[in-house]
Image (cartoon, rainbow, N blue to C red):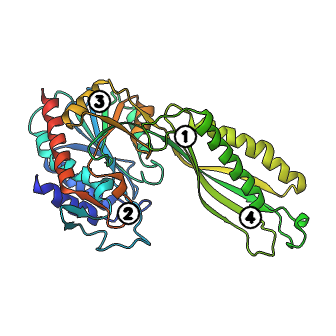
Amino acid sequence: MNSRTIEILERLVAFDTTSRTSNLALIEYVEAHLREYGVEFRRIPEGRDRVNLLATIGDAGKPGLLLGGHTDVVPVKGQNWSSDPFTLSHRNGRLHGRGAADMKGFLAALLAVLPEMTEAPLGMPLNLAFTYDEEIGCVGIRDLLEVMERMPVQPRWAIIGEPTGMQVVTAHKGKVACRLTVTGREGHSSNPDAGVNAIDVAAEAMAFLREMAHGCRHDGMADHGYAYPWTSFHVGRIEGGTAVNIIPGTCWFDFEIRNLPEEDGAAFLESYRGFIEGTLRQRVRDVDPACDVRLDVISSYPGLRTDTSSDLVIFATRLADAPATGKVAFGTEAGMIQRRLGTDCVVCGPGFIDQAHQPDEYVEVEQLEHCERFLREVIRALRR
């Protein structure tokens, strides 16, 4: 293995790029590597404290291969780490640090093989993409895709290096994350009719979500390539009320819909919105016009579905030495790239999602070695 990969990963992990904080120091470090090898790049957008970086190697006038990933990481607050999460720690063949698996390991391998990318002409150009704020709903890549949509030529293929154990993933679920907020009317709990119980109203809204989940599980589409084969509905946070003897005047909860890529997450959301705005809101306003039920979308991204017989899948599985393709429930930027640019996409990178977001997150050295071999094979194949 190129020891340079571990050196680069050490530097990348040391940058605290927790989502919603600046990634400029890391981007400047990447730009220094690109300049060293004469690679053209641009920040998108300019003049902000969180940016994407897009680089091109080869003829930008030809459809190429996009290799990319996000620079942000999830928070470490409240997690019990055995070592400093922003200092790479090497223990028993594992490299521990925040983002080691998700997904700075892939970015480190990408930068380590940069010399090979530039030492000979490529038959298919390479685009390298480093994005921001993926972890909070694929936020940053939207700026990048707005620019790429206007480019004369779109990438033909894309490989996103999320942790898949170096298996080539051809499909993942989409996601819609929302907050439902109920404004009720407070009163003394000894007379429930004196107010509008916001928690009771929120419970009705959650019950309708459960009904939708039940319908998907028993009457909807199923794909047993996923650990959970159906579109899922999940309430993750809730808050409401002030005291047990006060009718709660407010309540909110956050929920998500993770839809199979063959199903329409937006359609599920609109069905739910019809109940919320057409039935539940009217019911509380009939009691008191000042009461309300509001549904807000926090974030969303589409699923990924790539034909397993496509040229990209054949190319990637052969070079990754991965005979079987897979599907994952977690989301990536690949679905958005496919939807916005019409680019064939797969997900393939070192490490495993079970280690991501955890205290003592790690990537195995063997996984980085596998990733390096894969990237070098990709470069060789593009020269032919």
Say which residue appears at 17% left-offset and 27% top-offset.
123
Q: Could you tell me the amino acid type at mark 1? A: Thr
Residue 255 is situated, as x and y percent measured from the top left of the image, at 60, 52
Towards the viewer: 80 or 33: 80
Mark 4 or mark 2, which has the lower sequence index?
Answer: 4
Say which residue appears at 37% left-offset and 50% top-offset.
46
Q: Could you tell me the amino acid type at mark 3? A: Val
Q: Is residue 234 above or below residue 336?
A: below
Q: Is residue 130 visible?
A: no
Query: What whole-number distance in Å separates the C-alpha atoms at marks 4 and 2?
Result: 33 Å
Query: What whole-number distance in Å separates the C-alpha atoms at marks 3 and 4?
Result: 50 Å
In what quadrant of the picture does the C terminus appear?
top left
Label 4 neighbourhood size at 10 Å, few (<14), some (14-19), many (20+)? many
List the residue tagged with mark 1.
231
Label 2 neighbourhood size at 10 Å, few (<14), some (14-19), many (20+)? some
Label 1 neighbourhood size at 10 Å, few (<14), some (14-19), many (20+)? many
Are dots 1 and 3 in contact, CB under 8 Å?
Answer: no
Label 3 neighbourhood size at 10 Å, few (<14), some (14-19), many (20+)? many
List the residue tagged with mark 4.
250
Comparing labels 1 and 4, the label whose residue is closer to the camera: 1
Query: What whole-number distance in Å separates the C-alpha atoms at marks 1 and 3?
Result: 25 Å
Say which residue appears at 83% left-offset and 68% top-offset.
186
Q: Which mark is residue 313?
A: 3
Query: What whole-number distance in Å separates the C-alpha atoms at marks 1 and 2?
Result: 25 Å
Mark 2 or mark 3, which has the lower sequence index?
Answer: 3
Q: Is residue 40 visible?
A: yes
Q: Is residue 364 above or below residue 86?
A: above
